[in-house]
Amino acid sequence: MEVYGNGSSDLSISDPDLERQLVALNENKEMEEELHLAAILGKTLLERNTELEEQVKKLEEHIDETLLSNRNLTTQLSNTKEALRQANSSCESLEQKLEETERENRELKTTNLRRQVTIDLKTKIINDLHDRLEGFERELSEMKTLKSRDVPDGASNKPSSNNDSCRDLTRLNHDELLKEHYEIVEDLSIKLQNTNYQKNKTQTLLDTVKTENAKLSELLERTELENIELRSHVSALEEKLLNLSTSEPVTPSLPPTSPPKTFFARYPSEESPSFSRVTTLHTELLVDYQTMKEQYDYMVSNCRCESKSHMNLEDGDTTKDDVQRSGVDGKDKKNKTEGGSVVKESSLKDLFQEVYATLKATTVVADRLIEKRNHK
């Protein structure tokens, strides 16, 4: 009370100090509000970063599943191509066998025609020989008839050397000629039997070749149908693999949050499903975090400087009696103020460190995801 008892000059000096103290208190309140807002923003950023990290993990799992599916499809495609190659080689071998069988069939037909002509010629010769043999037999029977007529009944006992010799010579000639004809007929009969046997054997072989040709034709048709099915299956697999390799992974939409409008005003209402949008959002969050961290450091430094100047101003303006009278209260107030500011500062600092650690972990995951996608 004695400090303010010196007149109006002391009041005029203490009024500006009081105004400065009030201004400093108002600024401290504003800084506390800004720090509180920064803490809210950091917490919101941390929650959003957690959601983004979950989304990136889901995207990574989806990409891993897609890569595994692509590898399985590639393996299946290679196996199908190998089966198709084997089917093509078997088709080529069957076509070669079919061509060889057709060539052998043509050769057999040509041989059969030649043998048929030979058989016809030999049959004609045999028929001619049969006709000649019948003619010889008729002549022989006629000669026997003439011989029996030429010999009289009473002259059978007379010697006739000339007639006997002629008859013997004629008989020998006829016997030799008949024997030769019989030999020719036997040879021709044997040849005819052999020719018939060869003809039957050739006909049997021809029937067998025809049966094999029919079986080979059926097998070739079945192989061609299987080849067509394999080609269609390979085309479908290639189209599916192409669609999987060209399609972009779709990320699930983030749940709605309620951050301050001044901070997330530039973000759209719905997240884009593409991978590039996720990485862009992550980069923007990192930039926002750096900006907010700089603002936080700047506000903390200003708050410390102003609090120190305010404390110095209070120490210079108070008297010894005021100090003695209000020493305990001032110390308690100072301790409360410093303790509150330290607690707030440490809690905000821990929050920002937690946000930074989470963002760093998310950055590592995103970089690994980008490398995996580039490798893909």
Image: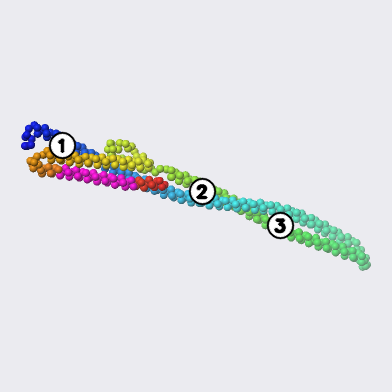
The percent coordinates of residue 74 (x first, y second) are: 46, 49
Q: Is residue 36 visible?
A: no
Q: Secondary structure at mark 2?
A: helix
Sort mark 1 into few (<14), some (14-19) or many (20+) by Cα contacts within 10 Å.
some
Give the side of residue 221 with respect to residue 176, left or right: left
Q: Which residue is mark 3?
A: 196
Front residue of 261/118: it is 261
Front residue of 56/214: it is 56
Q: Earlier in the sequence, mark 3 or mark 1?
A: 1
Magenta span of residues: 335-364
Circle nearer the viewer, 3 or 1 = 1
Labelled pair 2, 1 in contact (Cβ < 8 Å): no
Front residue of 343/59: it is 343
Which amino acid is tagged 1?
Gln
C-alpha gap between disc 3 and disc 2: 50 Å
Q: Earlier in the sequence, mark 3 or mark 2?
A: 3
Q: Secondary structure at mark 1?
A: helix
Which amino acid is tagged 2?
Leu
Circle nearer the viewer, 2 or 1 = 1
C-alpha gap between disc 2 and disc 1: 90 Å
State which quarter of the image contains the N terminus.
top left
Q: Which mark is residue 230?
A: 2
- How does the figure colour the protein chain or chains? rainbow
Give the side of residue 341 with respect to residue 238, left or right: left
Residue at 31% x, 46% y is 360
Residue at 8% x, 35% y is 4
C-alpha gap between disc 3 and disc 1: 140 Å
Q: Earlier in the sequence, mark 2 or mark 1?
A: 1
Which amino acid is tagged 3?
Asn
Sort mark 2 into few (<14), some (14-19) or many (20+) by Cα contacts within 10 Å.
some
Residue 270 figure quarter:
top left
Q: Which mark is residue 21?
A: 1
